[in-house]
Amino acid sequence: MPHALAPIPATSALPRLTPFVLLVLLAACGGADQPPPGTLLHADMNQTPERVVEEEPGPDGLILRMLSFGDEDGRRELRYERREGTTEDGRIQMMMSVAIPGADGRQGGHQTAPISLDIEAGPTEAAGDGLWRYHLRVTGLQVGLPPETPQEVLEHFATETAPLRALASTVVIDDRGIVHERAGEIPEGLEPRTLALLANIRMSLLSPVLPGAAIGEGATWEVKHLEDHGDFEVHQIVSYELVSLERHTGRLQVTLRQHAPPGPIGGREEDGGGEARGELISYETLGGGYVEFDLRHIIPEAQIAGRTHVEAVIETPAARIPTQSEMSIAIRVEPSR
């Protein structure tokens, strides 16, 4: 079970943070009543739901499948309202727990800590054809470790979370929340858990994708997309249900599923990296939660919990080391408004 989120206590300054913890945030999915990752999750990623009533293709292979339009009386088209020069601030809080089985199959280690990221989105600028461009970046990071934490643990978290401090992305998005272009600085050669975490943090800050058709309360749809996590690609399906709708705001119940096929990770020959430094055996995420959107704002309010299962083989000069991790996470996104 994911830990409940708690306020992030003040801590001594940490020069860097960790990728090991990072991946957990990206996995933001999967409640306790969900089957654990690794149980046939990949089997249904390419299946089309029987109740699809409308299917709409989008940029870069995105597919939006409309499952139901909701209450007829309150149906209307939902569109985000952007204004030139808008900048918004927010915070991501997460309580992360990571378990790593030992060589004998038993749990080899466990570490839990609250992490807080200060974020900025903007300024918005018109990109033509009804599109808007803005930047996402991390402006601050704190790890909630007590003063008596051993130095080696502090150093571990500093190393693992370092990529978070440099997290930045530029997106071009339309008035339905569909991303048409995206560029970001994700370092190469990171562990698959870290790559996934960085990519999913960016995703959690984006507005939910809205259908093109008029919808009302009770509407359901799903968005299928291939996400680039740097060293590997992840097949992703996000399912939405419109639970409530007011004039400018709404609440969505969200379910997230992710699966990455086996393949090499690390250095790439075309990048001069030589042989890959490892192999991804499996990567699967399952989770869920809610998103509260405001059509007038960039950053949504969200709370999601989930689990991720990662198996990989890491190459070292001396040996090939099999690794396996089960990660739980609870994440909350809070806009400053």
Image (cartoon, rainbow, N blue to C red):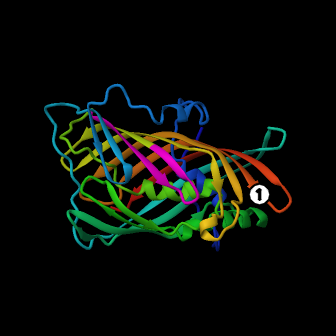
State the image coordinates of residue 115 (x, y, percent, origin top left): 57, 59
Q: Quadrant of residue 147?
A: bottom right
Is residue 185 part of the magenta span, yes or no? no
SS majority, magenta: strand
State the image coordinates of residue 38 (x, y, percent, origin top left): 61, 35
Query: Is residue 10 visible in this depiction of the protein?
Result: no
Count how many numbered circles sit on residues in the image: 1
Query: Is residue 299 visible in this depiction of the protein?
Result: yes
- Residue 147, relative to residue 227: is it above or below? below
Taking the spot 80% from the left edge, 53% from the top edge, the residue there is: 320
| Three-letter amino acid code of the residue under disc 1 | Glu
For disc 1, the marked residue is: 315
Q: Quadrant of the N terminus?
A: top right
Instruction: Count neighbours of disc 1 (C-alpha within 10 A) and say few if under 14, some if 14 to 19, many if 20 or more.
Output: some
Identify the element where label 1 is drawn: strand
Taking the spot 86% from the left edge, 59% from the top edge, the residue there is: 318
* Range covered by the magenta-colored residues: 219-236
State the image coordinates of residue 111 (x, y, percent, origin top left): 70, 51
Q: Nearer the viewer, residue 104 or 294?
A: 104
Is residue 235 part of the magenta span, yes or no? yes
State the image coordinates of residue 126 (x, y, percent, origin top left): 24, 70
